[in-house]
Image (cartoon, rainbow, N blue to C red):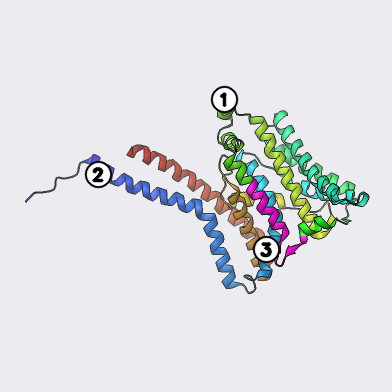
């Protein structure tokens, strides 16, 4: 009888490496799909445990209530991909709604009101990006923190700290109208999400964006216009805040300097909970949407269950910590995967 020859150390290593690669690849897949899976399990669990959650009327409420945070998160996503942060989005939202309301008191034109609202967002975003880049400020945190206070102060000053009533019909339709139970505001979310996805995935600008977030110095050396990319992401974030201001103003038919309080943190949390990397260089539109709806479902479920709003802050904070830890683990597994793959080769 022929006896099998014992395997050499090299042969044993070759047989073990593919198994380790498969295991690491599976772990990475689970971590990447984790936020989406968590959202699906959350929806399933809440629908089974909370009465009236899985009804068309409540689903419409969730979509409507989440639209503002989702729009802000899509703009915030682009900033975070470049290793930045935009703390001014909530104040930009409020200021744009106040400017729109003031314009409407003087001119009965929906087009001019919408232009004023969006133009306000673009202006604040452009100022943020220009001061950050051309002023050579160490981090966007400083600039956007300053504009957070400045924009909020201007909004409260020109409105005398009180809501200004009145918005044109088209703005009210966008913010508060619906087709049966499906809100018009979510069509805005879908359109913006598709635009962000196309810009990141189909345009050269998208490749520049990830290159700048991955390694700004290397991107600069390869000829990528880093300054223009950075200014552009803050302009887009400001525009997104203007769109969110239009939705908020349309929902309440008012402009107020107190609108959007806390939404800057919600938008950042949504991007990170959805799976984007806070260290930059990674993320897509789906991350922002998954994170925004995770926050929206949590808040809606706790409201339906008559749970104190204080617990909402705790639950969302814990979800943010878990998301950050998942990102750390993903980075560790990616490093291990590259090492094992190189050794197998």
Give the image location of residue 81, x and y in percent.
60, 41
| Callout 1–callout 2 Cβ contact below 8 Å | no
Of the residues under marks 3 and 1, which one precedes in the sequence?
3
Q: Secondary structure at mark 1?
A: helix
Of the residues under marks 3 and 2, which one precedes in the sequence?
2
Q: Residues within 10 Å of mark 2 (few under 14, many from 20)?
A: few
CA gap between label 3 and label 2 equals 54 Å
Q: Residue at x 67, y 61 (%)?
A: 63
Q: Which residue is mark 1?
A: 221
CA gap between label 1 and label 2 equals 44 Å
Give the image location of residue 239, x and y in percent.
74, 44
State the residue lying farthest toward the bottom.
51
Magenta-colored stretch includes residue 189: yes
Give the image location of residue 3, x and y in percent.
10, 49
Residue 192 visible in the picture? yes
Camera-nearest residue between 75 and 317: 75
Magenta-colored stretch includes residue 183: yes
Q: Residue at x 58, y 28 (%)?
A: 217
Of the residues under marks 1 and 2, which one precedes in the sequence?
2
Residue 135 visible in the picture? no
Q: Residue at x 69, y 51 (%)?
A: 71
Quarter the C terminus occupies: top left
Q: Is residue 87 above or below residue 318?
A: above
Give the image location of residue 52, x and y in percent.
65, 73
Q: Nearer the viewer, mark 1 or mark 2?
A: 1
Q: Secondary structure at mark 3?
A: helix
Indicate which disc residue 12 carries: 2
Give the residues drawn in magenta, as a range.
176-195
Q: Which residue is mark 3?
A: 62
């Amino acid at each position: 009888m022929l006896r099998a020859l014992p395997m050499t150390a090299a042969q044993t290593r070759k047989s073990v490496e593919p198994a380790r690669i498969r295991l690491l690849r599976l772990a990475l897949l689970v971590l990447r799909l984790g936020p989406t899976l968590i959202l699906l399990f959350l929806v399933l669990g809440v629908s089974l445990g909370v009465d009236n959650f899985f009804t068309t009327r409540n689903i419409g409420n969730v979509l409507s209530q989440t639209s503002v945070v989702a729009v802000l998160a899509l703009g915030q996503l682009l900033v975070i991909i470049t290793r930045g942060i935009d703390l001014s989005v909530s104040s930009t939202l409020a200021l744009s709604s106040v400017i729109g309301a003031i314009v409407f008191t003087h001119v009965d034109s929906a087009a001019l009101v919408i232009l004023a609202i969006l133009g306000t967002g673009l202006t604040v975003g452009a100022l943020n990006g220009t001061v950050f880049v051309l002023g050579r400020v160490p981090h966007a945190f400083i600039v956007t923190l300053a504009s957070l206070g400045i924009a909020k102060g201007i909004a409260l000053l020109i409105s005398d700290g009180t809501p200004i009533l009145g918005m044109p019909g088209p703005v009210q339709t966008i913010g508060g109208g619906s087709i049966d139970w499906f809100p018009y505001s979510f069509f805005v979310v879908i359109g913006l999400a598709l635009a962000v996805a196309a810009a990141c995935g189909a345009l050269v600008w998208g490749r520049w964006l990830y290159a700048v977030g991955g390694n700004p110095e290397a991107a600069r050396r390869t000829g990528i216009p880093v300054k223009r990319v950075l200014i552009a992401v803050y302009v887009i974030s400001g525009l997104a805040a203007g769109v969110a201001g239009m939705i908020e103003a349309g929902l309440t038919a008012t402009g107020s300097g107190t609108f959007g309080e806390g939404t800057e943190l919600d938008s950042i949390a949504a991007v990170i909970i959805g799976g984007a990397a806070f260290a930059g260089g990674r993320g897509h539109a789906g991350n922002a949407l998954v994170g925004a709806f995770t926050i929206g479902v949590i808040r809606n479920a706790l409201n339906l269950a008559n749970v104190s709003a204080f617990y909402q802050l705790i639950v969302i904070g814990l979800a943010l910590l878990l998301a950050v830890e998942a990102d750390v683990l993903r980075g560790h597994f990616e490093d291990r995967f590259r090492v094992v793959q190189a050794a197998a080769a």
